[in-house]
Image (cartoon, rainbow, N blue to C red):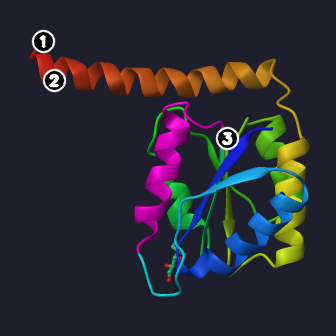
Amino acid sequence: METIAIASDHAGLELKEDIKTFLKEKGVDTLDMGTNGSESVDYPDYGIPVAEKVSMGKIEKGILICGTGIGMSIVANKFSNVRAALVNDVYSAKMAREHNDANILVIGGRIAGKGLAREMVKTWLEAKFEGGRHQKRLDKIREIENSIKESKSQRVSGS
Ligand code: RB5
């Protein structure tokens, strides 16, 4: 069974703990990357390590939670190979996997209640990427990532 990396800031802590409990009950292992206290922290400090792991292929999926989910999704989507989807409803959670092949699910701890959050996590984990025309669209996003990488390496090499 795959392990899911999970992290939050202080505003998402309570929901993170509940999602961990839920996943444990379902037999899914989690790698908790913080935060673990209620003091105010900066969401990038917790989103970055999860996004890095997913970006480098060290872990397949992650879950990030902050107050609205907005900050975490902005951070995570800076990383190549990361497709982070901020969801606030079950339909979006399903589509995030089926159409977008989202590898990080982002939830607003001050937006979604625990029941809804559990349902969104379950739906996202059980849904399957449909490929086909959706893969073609993801390929276009990959092309952007590749062209950014290329222009960076050209600047470094001075060509
Ligand atoms: C923290 O107050 C809050 O700004 C943060 O959790 C998040 O919502 C940012 O997008």
**Image height of 76 relative to 138, above or below:** below
45 in the magenta segment: yes
In the image, the residue with mark 3 has its CB under 8 Å from the nearest atom of ligand 1 = no
User: Of all residues shown, which one is farthest toward the left?
Assistant: 158
* Circle 3 Cα neighbour tier, 10 Å, few/some/many (<14 / 14–19 / ≥20): many
| Mark 1 neighbour density, 10 Å: few (under 14) some (14–19) many (20 or more) | few
The residue sitting at the bottom extreme is 39
Give the amino acid at mark 1.
Ser
| Marks 2/1: CA–CA distance | 7 Å
Residue highlighted by disc 2: 155
The kind of residue on which mark 2 rests is: Arg
Residue at 56 percent of width and 39 percent of height: 54
Within 8 Å: ligand 1 and the Cβ of disc 1?
no
Q: Residue at x 50, y 20 (%)?
A: 143
Q: x, y (%) of residue 18? A: 77, 73
Q: Amino acid at mark 3?
A: Asn
Provide the residue designation for mark 3. 103
How many C-alpha atoms fall within 10 Å of the one at disc 2: few (<14), some, or many (≥20)?
Answer: few
Label disc, if present, on residue 17 of the rendered structure: none
Report, in whole angstroms, how far the alpha carbon at label 3 lies from the one at label 2: 30 Å
Q: Is residue 77 visible?
A: no
Helix, strand or loop at label 3? It is loop
SS at circle 1: loop
- Judge from the rendering whether residue 153 lies leftward or rightward of residue 141; answer left or right: left
Residue 70 is left or right of residue 20, and the answer is left
Q: Quadrant of the N terminus?
A: top right
* Residue span colored magenta: 42-60
Asked which quadrant contains residue 30, the reply is bottom right
Asked if labels 1 and 2 touch by Cβ distance under 8 angstroms, the answer is: no
